[in-house]
Amino acid sequence: MPASMSFTEDREDRNATLETRLSHFPAQRIEIAPQRAIGYREAGRANLDGTLPLVLLHGIGSGAASWVQQLEALGTTRSVFAWDAPGYGESTCVSSPSPQADEYARALREWLDALHIERCVLLGHSLGAIVAGSFAASHGNRIAGLLLLSPAAGYGAASEEVRASKRDSRLAMLAELGPQGLADRRSANMLSRHAHEASREWVRWNMMRIVPHGYAQATHLLANADLATDVAKFDGRIAVAVGAEDTITPPASCERIAQAARTRLQIIPCAGHAGYIERGAAYTALIEAFCRMSDGQRSKA
């Protein structure tokens, strides 16, 4: 970096570059019910021949924009849709102040219906894996393949004391820091020590844009959910992967989800929790290979 360029200027330049890339996949919004809508980004709508749509669900501190690398790379061969979960971006919140996973799964079903997506490959990252697992448990016939990256297990099977502690500590941090402070405090935890500064800034950029009420509802979802129980109900194609240096949902935690799903855990070296951001090429290759294996399930219901 030139001596004349400050760290702030360098940060702004990196974010401007990423926002320029993101501009090729503008934010959209679709009504799923009266006074209810989902915001999303998409790529490759024309790429439908012989391939299934890929649907991407982000984690608790993120949004549809975090998938820009996957939209760029995978949208060249298939249609790709990344939602803003209920309460994120332009998406309407779910109605319950302390929602269960099936409320988000219902919103996902309504969104897919509105987009006329009858069957897809479904990918959930972190908290998005909880939503994906709930949808798979209740609408398995609509999923040709379920891919869970660094899945959050949820605390639904824990004691009420543990659930309340996990929930309330996160809510207190949100109330104290707000979105920007939360991004400053927690975004670095999302990545490994190998991550480039551009990846760190992109994680922070996404986290700064969370909507407090939606994030609070997602915090309750995390406390209420039990992903292992849901994935055990799904008998279709499933894969689970985690970064070797993920400290938020570490490999030992993800191994329990893989066991419940009756599959082998894949561990990606030199990657943290948001591995699909810091190791975009490796994760995109993993996703692409999984999608290709699932394409043969296109018409099986």
Image (cartoon, rainbow, N blue to C red):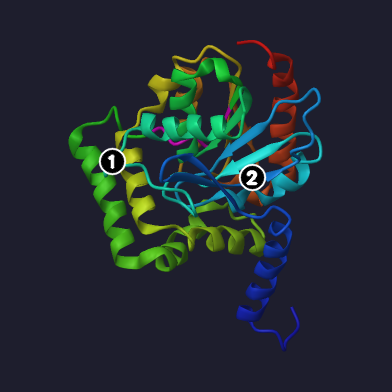
Q: Residues within 10 Å of mark 2 (few under 14, many from 20)?
A: many
Location of the C terminus (image quadrant): top right
Q: Which of marks 1 and 2 is nearer the N terminus?
A: 1
Residue 235 drawn above or below residue 80: above
Residue beneath disc 1: 96
Q: Residue at x 64, y 64 (%)?
A: 197
Residue 287 drawn above or below residue 40: above
User: Which one is nearer the viewer's eye here, 186 or 31?
Assistant: 31
Give the image quarter of residue 144: top right
105 relative position to 219: left or right: right
Q: Which residue is drawn at 76% across and 25% down?
A: 51
Q: Reply yes or no: does residue 148 show up in magenta.
A: yes
Mark identifier at residue 276 = 2
Residue interval drawn in magenta: 147-153
Q: What residue type is labelled 1?
A: Ser
**Does the image show residue 109?**
yes
Q: How far apart are marks 1 and 2 (CA)?
A: 31 Å
Percent x, y of residue 254: 48, 31
Residue 41 drawn above or below residue 238: below
Residue at the far front: name it. 34
Percent x, y of residue 158: 26, 31
Label 2: which secondary element: helix
Looking at the image, is mark 1 or mark 2 nearer the viewer?
Answer: 1
Mark identifier at residue 217 = none
Q: Are marks 1 and 2 in contact (CB under 8 Å)?
A: no
Q: Residue at x 71, y 49 (%)?
A: 69
User: Which one is nearer the viewer's eye here, 171 or 80?
Assistant: 80
Q: What residue type is labelled 2?
A: Tyr
Percent x, y of residue 219: 34, 46
